[in-house]
């Protein structure tokens, strides 16, 4: 134990290199903002600097990921496993997309300031910390760092009341849910006497604590807190308003970065720390997944604003990811990572298209604004169609999105405790989602241009167009030949604590110890 | 001899890959082709598309002759982690459908006027090529994941073709079609994941071997079979899952109607679902349910066809009725009934497809093609009239045409298994004659309404296309043996495989079902 601590103290700099680079870079951007002359040019340079910082951090993470885990990393507060690096990669992909989109969007929306990119970097630091830590304290730190930055980003457009409203709503509800989270963590600590996840798992399985009321209460509060962060029903109410009100690039940031990071941390806590109590939390996760898939997809049906529709669709996707968590298997972990990548690519792309179409005017993101897009901008419309089909999980034309669904289904059905019912709910919910995703496609391809809603100015999709092109390309290529991504996801294992299924219900009796959780390909 | 065979199969491999590559790459080519502003109808895109589809048709025909002994395989690594391989096979069951598809798509493009595509012509032709690749992929795939990809790939171009180039209600019809068929497909996806996880791979070979060892219990098999059947029967529009078909076929362009008439669903049922779930497929209850659904399809489809307001909807219901015969033949599962079912699938594609193209030509001349708005066309369009009568008779199963052989074999092969149902289905044959001849009479003969504009007869191009259909109809009607011979071996081995798997894996103490 002591040796582990020493190691952590010694090598903290190496272990936290990507996070440190990000936060130092964020301060650098802030400094630049303080001294640079105000104006569009400086804003642009601040964004470019932030992009550079994110790239450097990604390189550092890639370097670390290729090293063998140092001694003592198995128990320390910072994880050094494939799951962390995979999540970091997905998050940084989202960060890069956001920064590029924001650079051009902010110019159009006259949001000239150097602080937004710095805030994005700070939030990214929090996200990376969140997915990299194996200690409740650090996880909380990460959540707070991420959330506070995103609250500010949501309300960035002070001239627009809806943006301020969204920020306030997000802040109030967010801090409320953080309270739940913190209280849940405290109860977990009270029950197990540790905040370290692997230790917690050992304590739970050694002490037969799975049915401890304190632990159950702690888990319940933890579920509420995380369900809020990942926007799972019935804790999703904030999502549509906040997504609609926030400036488009930061909506995208919330949809991909925040969600992936919170999800990765949630998965780590449930599978690593609370793994031995699987029988106790399985049903709650099951219900959460089912409710989230149904609510997200059904409510998305009636949305006219595409940002709002994507908000509900992001709720639905949280449900699909929860299905992967309920399997509690290494296939499930790989499925989470794979799914997060496909979802990130498609979502970032879709928001990029929206930011171009709206031309910086927030109200211009309804289906009517997309009508006839295939006539005015065929390439953009085709890209959007790919993103929609990808989110729908449609093969070939939707590319990687299909294999993401396939992977989750595989994990659900092949799990030690097969989740066949959830799999059926998942596909039926996907059918519902076809209606609204196709609604976007139908508006773009089968409706005439709405002359009254012509954008005031035509935005040239410069770098944002580049992001869209890269996203389409990756989605389509990995949709035909997904093997590289599958191998990458398979490598992202999460050390799952062995656990005895204590007082498992009859349906859970099949849960086997660790050996069977790791399926050989 | 050996060397020649190796050459033959090597060539067959190349052709199979080309059959998918030509339309796929062609779609990209057509889409990216430079388009002069004056070329609103996409004349150049059309020429290129016809050329590429012509190549595809030639390749398909060549494949028919070079495949040495009924099967040939393409096998490349694809996604090892899922046990999926890029595997294509040409068997006696897929070959006839491949050839038919290639020719149908080619003829459909030639048959439609350049002027009928009024907007976004390049995309239109690119989607047709994509659609062709999807359908050919369904027939050629020998890996379940690859099959599923092609199966869904077919949906996207059809959705756009119906929605963008269809009539005013096209978008709604396209959406109904998409969502309806997706319910079945996604349920099938769950079943695919289930069987492939149990078997450890997705190639047909692995899955069929696993089916022989029966890793799934009878209950799981029944559930999975039901999921597969739901996808296949919705896609082929068996009653009561048929409501999307008449909408899609009459609102979409004629070409989409032709493509929808290609029976990919029943092909999947026979070639995929039966060998994978032998216990479920030969379960007595399943058989009687399927056969009854088939016969209900025949009778109900025929009766509904009697009361349709326009010829295209009559043809939609006629194809629904034909589908009933296919399902009856498959569920009887004898050599004759399967041969008949395969022939009906082919014939439905040819005769119904031909009729839809003919009706498309009519629609270009008369915008309102409801029965009450026209009549007496035979006087103005004698050639059109003659062709329509021939197609209608072939559809009704007149001896000497292709329609007769297929339906006769189905009834013959199934009689022994389901005598009562077969007698009922025979009534459907009579009804078919009634609705088709009545529709023909209302279109071609009788008084001509005042409002109807003067029309000219078929052009040389249109008549030429239809000539090919006539040759196919008469040819298959008088000499079906080359096609039947091609299928023979595949059908026998399919029956053997399913029967053996069903008997050898029957759990002790369980009834054997009627597998004799």
Image (cartoon, rainbow, N blue to C red):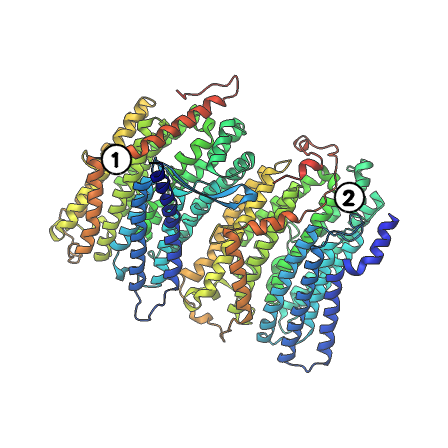
Q: Which mark is residue A377?
A: none
Q: Is residue B173 visible?
A: no
Asked whether B416 or B427 is in front, the reply is: B416
Count of numbered badges drawn on the protein: 2
Tell me if A75 is positioned left or right of A244 in this view: right
Instruction: Say which residue label 1 marks.
Output: B482
Instruction: Say which residue label 2 marks.
Output: A217
The quarter of the image holding the C terminus of chain B is top left
Tell me if B435 is positioned left or right of A109 in this view: left
Q: Secondary structure at mark 1?
A: helix
Q: Residue furthest top?
A: B509
Tell me if B298 is positioned left or right of A287 in this view: left
Q: Quadrant of residue A274?
A: top right
Tell me if B138 is positioned left or right of B387 in this view: right
Question: Callout 2: residue from which chain?
Answer: A
Q: Quadrant of residue B295?
A: top left
Query: Dot 2, how many residues are within 10 Å of its Cα: few (below 14), some (14-19), or many (20+)?
Result: some
Asked whether B173 or B232 is in front, the reply is: B232
Task: Measure the C-alpha gap from mark 2 to mark 1.
Answer: 74 Å
Q: Is residue A236 above or below residue B304?
A: below
Q: Are marks 2 and 1 on the same chain?
A: no
Q: Position of residue A27 (x, y in %)?
A: 75, 71
Q: Is residue B407 above or below residue A435?
A: above
Q: Residue furthest right?
A: A2
Query: Dot 1, how many residues are within 10 Å of its Cα: few (below 14), some (14-19), or many (20+)?
Result: few
């Amino acid at each position: 134990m002591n040796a582990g601590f020493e190691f952590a103290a010694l090598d903290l700099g190496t272990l936290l290199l990507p996070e440190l680079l990000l936060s130092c870079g964020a301060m650098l951007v802030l400094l630049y903002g303080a001294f640079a002359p105000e104006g569009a040019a400086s804003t642009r340079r601040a964004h470019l600097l932030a992009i550079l910082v994110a790239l450097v951090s990604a390189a550092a993470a890639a370097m670390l990921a290729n090293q063998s885990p140092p001694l003592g990393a198995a128990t320390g507060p910072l994880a050094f496993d494939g799951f962390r690096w995979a999540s970091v990669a997905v998050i940084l992909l989202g960060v890069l997309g956001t920064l590029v989109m924001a650079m051009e969007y902010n110019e159009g929306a006259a949001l000239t300031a150097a602080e937004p990119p710095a805030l994005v970097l700070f939030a990214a630091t929090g996200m990376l910390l969140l997915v990299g830590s194996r200690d409740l304290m650090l996880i909380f730190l990460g959540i707070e760092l991420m959330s506070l930055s995103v609250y500010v980003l949501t309300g960035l457009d002070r001239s627009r009341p809806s943006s301020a409203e969204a920020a306030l709503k997000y802040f109030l509800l967010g801090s409320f849910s953080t309270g739940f989270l913190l209280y849940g963590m405290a109860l977990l600590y009270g029950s197990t006497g540790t905040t370290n996840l692997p230790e917690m798992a050992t304590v739970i399985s050694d002490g037969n604590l799975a049915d401890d009321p304190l632990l159950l209460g702690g888990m319940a509060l933890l579920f509420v807190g995380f369900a809020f962060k990942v926007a799972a029903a019935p804790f999703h109410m904030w999502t549509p308003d906040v997504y609609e009100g926030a400036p488009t690039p930061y909506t995208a940031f919330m949809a991909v970065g925040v969600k992936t990071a919170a999800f990765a941390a949630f998965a780590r806590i449930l599978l690593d720390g609370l793994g031995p109590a699987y029988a106790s939390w399985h049903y709650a996760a099951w219900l959460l997944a089912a409710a989230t898939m149904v609510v997200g997809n059904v409510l998305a049906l009636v949305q006219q604003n595409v940002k709002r529709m994507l908000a509900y669709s992001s709720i639905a996707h949280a449900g699909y990811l929860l299905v992967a968590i309920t399997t509690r298997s290494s296939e499930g972990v790989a499925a989470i990572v794979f799914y997060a990548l496909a979802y990130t690519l498609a979502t970032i792309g879709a928001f990029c298209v929206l930011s171009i179409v709206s031309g910086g005017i927030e109200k211009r993101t309804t289906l009517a604004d997309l009508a006839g897009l295939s006539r005015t901008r065929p390439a953009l419309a085709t890209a959007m169609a790919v993103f929609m089909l990808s989110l729908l999980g449609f093969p070939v034309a939707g590319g990687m999105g299909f294999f993401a669904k396939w992977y989750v289904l595989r994990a659900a059905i092949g799990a030690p405790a097969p989740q066949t019912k959830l799999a059926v709910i998942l596909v039926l919910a996907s059918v519902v989602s076809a209606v609204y995703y196709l609604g976007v496609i139908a508006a773009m391809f089968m409706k005439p241009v709405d002359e009254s809603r012509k954008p005031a100015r035509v935005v040239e999709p410069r770098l944002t167009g580049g992001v869209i092109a890269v996203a389409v390309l990756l989605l389509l290529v990995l949709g035909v030949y997904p093997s590289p991504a599958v191998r990458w996801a398979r490598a992202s294992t999460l050390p799952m604590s062995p656990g005895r299924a204590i007082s498992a219900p009859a349906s859970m009796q099949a849960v086997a110890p660790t050996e069977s959780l790791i399926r050989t390909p | 001899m050996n060397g020649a065979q190796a050459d033959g199969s090597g060539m067959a491999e190349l052709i199979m890959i080309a059959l998918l590559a030509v339309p796929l790459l062609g779609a990209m080519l057509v889409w990216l082709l430079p388009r002069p502003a004056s070329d609103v109808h996409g004349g150049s895109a059309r020429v290129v598309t016809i050329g590429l589809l012509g190549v595809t048709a030639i390749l398909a025909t060549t494949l028919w002759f070079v495949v040495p002994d009924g099967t040939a395989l393409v096998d490349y690594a694809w996604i090892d982690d899922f046990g999926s391989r890029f595997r294509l096979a040409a068997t006696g069951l897929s070959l006839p459908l491949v050839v038919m598809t290639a020719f149908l798509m080619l003829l459909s493009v030639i048959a439609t006027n350049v002027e009928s595509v009024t907007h976004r012509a390049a995309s239109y032709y690119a989607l047709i090529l994509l659609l062709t690749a999807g359908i050919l992929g369904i027939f050629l795939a020998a890996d379940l994941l690859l099959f599923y990809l092609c199966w869904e790939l077919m949906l996207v171009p059809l959705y756009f073709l119906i929605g963008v180039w269809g009539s005013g209600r096209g978008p709604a019809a396209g959406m109904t079609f998409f969502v309806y068929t997706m319910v079945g497909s996604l349920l099938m996806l769950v079943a695919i994941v289930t069987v492939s996880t149990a078997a450890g791979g997705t190639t047909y070979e692995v899955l069929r071997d696993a089916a022989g060892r029966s890793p799934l219990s009878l209950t799981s098999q029944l559930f999975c079979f039901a999921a597969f059947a739901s996808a296949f029967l919705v896609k082929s529009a068996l009653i009561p899952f048929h409501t999307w078909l008449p909408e899609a076929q009459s609102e979409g362009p004629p070409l989409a109607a032709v493509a929808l008439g290609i029976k990919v669903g029943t092909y999947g049922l026979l070639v995929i679902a039966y060998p994978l779930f032998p216990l479920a497929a030969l379960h007595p209850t399943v058989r009687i349910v399927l056969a009854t659904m088939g016969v209900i399809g025949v009778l109900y489809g025929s009766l509904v066809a009697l009361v349709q307001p326009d010829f295209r909807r009559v043809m939609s219901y006629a194809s629904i009725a034909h589908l009933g015969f296919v399902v009856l033949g498959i569920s009887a599962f004898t050599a004759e009934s399967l041969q008949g079912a395969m022939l009906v699938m082919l014939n439905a594609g040819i005769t119904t497809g031909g009729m839809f193209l003919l009706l498309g030509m009519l629609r270009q001349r008369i915008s309102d093609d409801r029965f009450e708005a026209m009549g007496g066309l035979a006087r103005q369009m004698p050639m059109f009239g003659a062709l329509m009568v021939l197609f209608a008779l072939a559809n009704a199963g007149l001896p000497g045409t292709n329609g007769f052989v297929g339906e006769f074999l189905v009834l013959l092969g199934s009689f022994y298994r389901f005598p009562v149902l077969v007698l009922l289905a025979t009534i459907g044959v009579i009804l078919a004659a009634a609705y088709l001849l009545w529709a023909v009479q209302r279109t071609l003969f009788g008084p001509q309404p005042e409002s109807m504009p003067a029309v000219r007869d078929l052009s040389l191009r249109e008549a030429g296309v239809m000539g090919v259909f006539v040759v196919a109809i008469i040819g298959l009607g008088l000499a079906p043996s080359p096609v039947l011979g091609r299928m023979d071996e595949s059908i026998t081995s399919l029956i053997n495989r399913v029967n053996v798997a069903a008997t050898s894996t029957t759990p002790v103490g369980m009834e054997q079902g009627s597998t004799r």
